[in-house]
Amino acid sequence: MPSAIAIEETKSIPRRSRRFPVGLLIVGLAILGAVIYLVYANTQASAAYYLTVKELRQCTSCNTRSVRVSGNVQAGSIVKDEKTNTLRFTIVEGGQTLQVVYSGVVPDIFKDGVQVVVEGHYTGSDPFQAQTLLAKCPSKFQTGTPTP
């Protein structure tokens, strides 16, 4: 059993309350803010709006950002300039046409009638300056019933 003197000594010693370090809180909030900003800035830099040809023609603010447009390559519209490695073609979507200029690697399946997605900048008048050209693969799967 503890003596009366030992009990009185423990009562007279004030207990310090444990406080959370303010400096650590500030550093943690700064790091969290930096991570949120980097995620937001990176998302905005790589974001591209997906529009139809008709929507692109009506867009007034599309000249300030990157956009994606989808359509089918119009038959007979593909012109390749070997000297400048430039490809010119027209895409058709919903009765609307859009002339496209592209420099870069052309997908193997790119030809008349194939569905493409172009990403780039539009100044408000033709041609659309494409920086990316993607050709969609036609589906090789067909519906049908198995024969016994």
Image: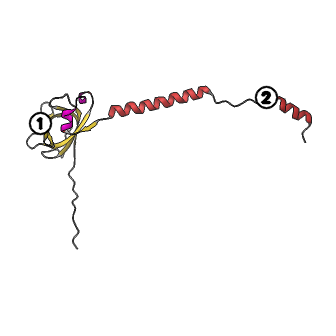
Q: In the image shown, does 119 or 51 lie closer to the viewer?
A: 51
x, y (%) of residue 3? 92, 37
- Which residue is labeled 2 in the image? 14
Does dot 2 land on a helix, a strand or a loop? loop
Amino acid tagged 2: Pro
What is the quadrant of the N terminus in the image? top right
Amino acid tagged 1: Lys
Labels 2 and 1: the sequence-earlier one = 2
x, y (%) of residue 53? 18, 38
Q: Callout 1: few (<14), some (14-19), or many (20+) C-alpha neighbours within 10 Å?
A: some
x, y (%) of residue 132? 23, 36
Disc marking residue 131: none
Residue for point 46% across, 29% down: 34
Residue situated furthest left in the rendering:
76
Residue for point 15% across, 40% down: 91
- Which residue is labeled 1 in the image? 80
Q: In the image shown, does 26 or 58 lie closer to the viewer?
A: 58
Does dot 1 land on a helix, a strand or a loop? strand
What is the quadrant of the C terminus in the image? bottom left
Which region of the structure is painted magenta?
Answer: 54-63
Q: In the shown orientation, is residue 9 left or right of residue 96?
A: right
Q: In the image shown, does 46 or 106 lie closer to the viewer?
A: 46
Q: Nearer the viewer, mark 2 or mark 1?
A: 2
Give the Cα separation between the discs numbered 2 and 1.
86 Å
